[in-house]
Image (cartoon, helix red, strand yellow):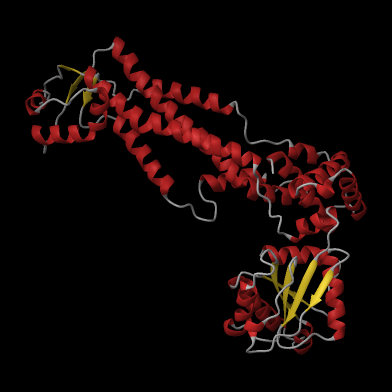
Amino acid sequence: MHEDAARRVLMLQAFETAGSDSPLWTAEDRAWATRLARETGATTARPAQALDQRARHALERLAPRDAAVPKRLGLRMWHTAWVPFVLGLAFAAGIAVDAIGGTQRINLLAPPVWVVILWNLVVYLGLLVPRPAAPRGLRALLARRLAGGSGGSAPLRAYGTAWAQASLPLAAARAAVLLHVAAAALALGLVAGLYVRGLVLDYRAGWESTFLDPAAVRAALAGLLWPATTVTGLSVPDVAGIEALRLTPGTAATASAAEWIHLYAAMLALFVIAPRAVLALVASSRAAWRARHISLPLQDPYFQRLLRDLQDARAVVQVLPHGAAPSPQATLALREWLAAACGEGLQLRLAEPTPYGQEERATAAEPGTTLRVLLVDLGSTPEDDTQGRLLATLKAQPEAPGAALLVLADEAAFRRRFAQLPERLAERRAAWQAFAARHGAGYLGLDLEHPDIAQAEARLQAALQR
């Protein structure tokens, strides 16, 4: 969705998932926003449009209650005026920098222009290296700026974190635009500075070296400046001409530097100005596209429940016990907990238990299933060749490819057995959580004798996000 719509949706999500930390937005407010969105056409709208429509209605009521909400929504890190500002500043800096040196003599083997070219070549190579998953360097700085720091209420901090995660690709593309524009403008300023100084100063060229002879110098300059000589039609002097340019201690350079200035200017144009201009255009196009296509995790339980409510749909949850069937009391508790987590009208499908050793024969899900729950006992040991094989079987079944997958461990019996040893409970939870993460599933431990109904939705969302 568009970045403005994504901001609204994420801001509302932050308040609706804050629980007791947000008295500004109640369950009645939530129901009102959903009902109003449905009455104004959200039922038939696309998911992104339906969520934004509901968020617009909700913020009309929420914004007057918390002045920080509209202020935070209006906070922007990007302004289009920054592009011409950065361009002008970098161009002026390039003109101000003397790329040749204050002595009016160009050392053909060591002009500072090569430092600029080399740095840009390093940057180009860096663009080809895959980025690490975790933000680093400039991307980490952008993520912190997007999150807005640690100030504000809990919902505002949650919004900042969610917005930073969703908009980091867009912010990175916009930062790339500024960096490429700055690099191109700086090089353009260097070229302009070369010619401006050449109009009022008399630059001379020469070279000196302890180890290189004229033939080696001629070969090096011809190779390095080959792109410029090809484009401009100018040529590097022959060995005799290079020998005439050699400087000895106490002698001054006498050869005109005009042709060498043309060559170095051409090298800057070929290796800095033109590539950076193209990269800036590509980054600008990418940023414009990303601004219209912010991706939100619509597979999360929060969004799935909202979309079902807006589209008058119901959650279909399949529970697959492993080893043994849950008791009638545990089944009733699980149904109540899932209804609180997934919404009223829950359609629960309790499959037959999958015996040990028959994991490849797990019951398939019916089309339209939104969540598949592997129900295990916390007292059992997670093993790759049993429960792991069962999870692999569930993932391979084609009937419900979009369904979320959750490993739910019943902690009731284990809690009774080790009531005096809380460290055993923590160890077993950690083992099951690591197992679920290794197999690409969410994990949740739940005491089905005393399920926490009030926190059902928040706990389910947190488990699936992990």
Farthest residue to the left: give it: 240
Q: Position of residue 102 (x, y in %)?
A: 29, 21
Reply above or below: 330 against 35.
Answer: below
Residue at horizontal 48%, vertical 52%? 131
For the C terminus, the image quarter is bottom right
Lateral position of residue 122 relative to residue 2, left or right: left
Residue at horizontal 60%, vertical 36%? 288
Residue at horizontal 25%, vertical 20%? 103
Q: Quadrant of residue 431?
A: bottom right
Reply above or below: 453 against 29.
Answer: below
Q: How many numbered tags mark residues here?
A: 0
Residue at horizontal 14%, vertical 30%? 208
Lateral position of residue 198 relative to residue 333, left or right: left
Lateral position of residue 81 relative to residue 347, left or right: left
Is residue 209 visible to the viewer in this orientation of the structure? no
Is residue 286 visible to the viewer in this orientation of the structure? yes
Q: Quadrant of residue 375?
A: bottom right
Which of the two residues, 396 or 225, is positioned nearer the viewer here?
Answer: 396
Farthest residue to the top: give it: 200
Q: Position of residue 327 (x, y in %)?
A: 83, 86
For the N terminus, the image quarter is top right
Lateral position of residue 45 relative to residue 92, left or right: right
Reply above or below: 178 against 309.
Answer: above
Q: Quadrant of residue 95?
A: top left
Which of the two residues, 112 or 232, is positioned nearer the viewer here?
Answer: 232
Q: Position of residue 347 (x, y in %)?
A: 84, 70
Q: Position of residue 210 (x, y in %)?
A: 11, 36
